[in-house]
Image (cartoon, helix red, strand yellow):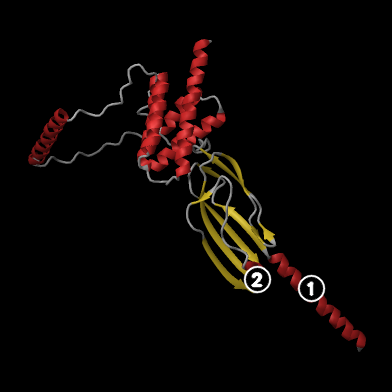
Amino acid sequence: MRQQFIIIIIIFTLFAAVQVADAQDSHFVKATVSKNKMLLGEPVTLTVQALVPDSSAARFTGQLAFDHFEALKDPEITTGETKSGTEIKAIYTITSFDSGHWVIPPISIAPLQSDSIAMDVVFTSPFDSTQAYHDIKDVVDVKVPKKKNDWWYYAAAGAVLLALVTWQLLRKKQTPPPATPPAVPGINPYDEAMQMLDQLMADKPAVKQFYSRLTEIFRLYVFRKKGILSLQKTTDDLVLQVKPLVPEKEQFDRLSQTLRLADFVKFARYIPGEEDNHTSLTEIRRTITLIEKAAAKQAHE
């Protein structure tokens, strides 16, 4: 009888140990992202899921900070109690304005942590050669509806158009149209750009006007120094045109980020801080100086 009692105690102890081990093995922390390759400034969803012991739940604050990434809004965090511990789900919306290959480090909820996540931040979407081309379609005949007796629509439209043309001509006579700032006599493009940057820093205009003037100064310098028609180009076209002028890859990357940041600001997709404004002006000044030195060196050779 005593031996049977001892055997029952041993079986019960082993069963309890197995249950504890299973509960510990079921605890986890998992981090996933909606995509591992993102465009510069593109929002990406980071989801953290965890099942942790009750003693660790209070240690999760929900605040995360990674190099090269920033949060676009506060995380959505939900928690729930289960027999195995506390379930946690946190959804973050993050982005990056630094191009390159980066790693989101493991996320720790003591005593557990997730795996790290590799992320690629690029300027433009790569061409997908696996996608099928669209076939060329034949010409489709369109049935022309019968003309209605609506001549008076055209007469009214013509009168309105004539009034607008007349008003525009009178307006042009009263105020001269804005034009590209003329070159200052006796000053080269580099000195002119430096003076305009100094004046911009002294004026301290509103943030949108600041970035508009900053990019105009750079475009005007490139146009007058190198003859590149940059004033009407998009930012992507401008970046491709000036790439041969900036052989240093790190400086070229910083210039590209500055020009794209200016677009984000002008279209109200990003609100920069004072440090961003200072850094952007510094990068434009540094790039102009680098182009000027390279041109001078080439002229001496």
Estimate the spatial distance between the alpha carbons at disc 1 and disc 2, rounded to whole Å: 19 Å
Is 87 positioned to the left or the right of 16 in the image? Answer: left
Q: Which numbered tag is attached to residue 54?
A: 2
Q: Is residue 162 left or right of residue 243?
A: left
Does 115 appear above or below 87? Answer: above
Give residue 56's quadrant in the image.
Answer: bottom right
Percent x, y of residue 154? 11, 38
Q: Residues within 10 Å of mark 2 (few under 14, many from 20)?
A: some
Q: Secondary structure at mark 1?
A: helix
Q: Which quadrant: the N terminus?
A: bottom right
Between 191 and 103, the one nearer to me in the picture: 191
Task: Decide if residue 224 is in sight here.
Answer: yes
Q: Residue at x 36, y 27 (%)?
A: 231
Which is more foreground, mark 1 or mark 2?
2
Q: Secondary structure at mark 2?
A: helix
Residue under circle 1? 17
Going from the N terminus, do you reach mark 1 or mark 2 first?
1
Q: Residue 138 falls in which quadrant of the image? A: top left
